Image (cartoon, rainbow, N blue to C red):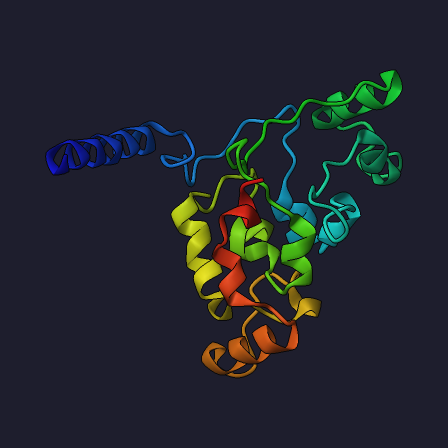
Amino acid sequence: MSILAGGLITALVLGFILVTMRSPFTKAPVGIAVPQPVRFSHELHAGTLNVDCRYCHSSAEVSSYAGIPDTHTCMSCHSQIATYSELLEPVRNSYASDERLVWNRVHAVGQYVYFNHSAHLNGGIGCETCHGRIDQMPIVWRNETMTMRWCLDCHFEPEKYIRPVDEVYTMGWTPPIPQSELGPQLVAEYDIHKDGLTDCAVCHR
């Protein structure tokens, strides 16, 4: 019986390793820019022009989904700025036809994962923690693997990553005191219960 149990456990472990190695979410393409229908530069908009993340990703604070702006949002500026730019022709066509542009997903987790943007932002986890220095990216690439192991690093020790809620959109933010002191203070202030962060149901529903 013990031999059978040992064989079953071995088979399960090997199966898990095989699936994990082949998973597109484990072997995520980090650092590779993803082509888009429009060459939108976060480096220009979020960096040089300092456009607030929420101007385009308006639902990030109140919804699980950050939101991808439609071209009406783009044209609120570009009806007056760079009006005849060839780069923006797809945007103008989309606006005129009322057909949405189809953007290619960059930051994706598995379909079996529930991720809530608002919970992270309102809990003091900054955009930069997951997306990297988006304000320095002419074309967006994935900055982190988005694997379960990577997520759990933060869920086990959120005090290493947490920041004040009013700084979650600040790129290049540095803590005013050592993170080893600030982190535990914020975890307590925001009433974050670390023990519950690693429950399966938090991310898998």
* Visible residue check, residue 183: yes
Q: Position of residue 26 (x, y in %)?
A: 38, 37
Nearer the observer, 138 or 6 = 6
Task: Kindly indicate the quadrant of the structure image that contains residue 157.
Answer: bottom left
Q: Position of residue 190 (x, y in %)?
A: 65, 72
Residue 168 vs 179, above or below: the answer is above
Residue 190 vs 150, above or below: the answer is below
Residue occupying the point 79% across, 48% down: 55
Name the image quarter holding the C terminus: top right
Name the image quarter holding the N terminus: top left
Residue situated furthest front in the rendering = 1
Residue situated furthest left in the rendering = 3
Q: Position of residue 59 (x, y in %)?
A: 77, 46
* Visible residue check, residue 132: no
User: Left of 176 or right of it: where is 60?
Assistant: right
Task: Kindly indicate the quadrant of the structure image that contains residue 140.
Answer: top right
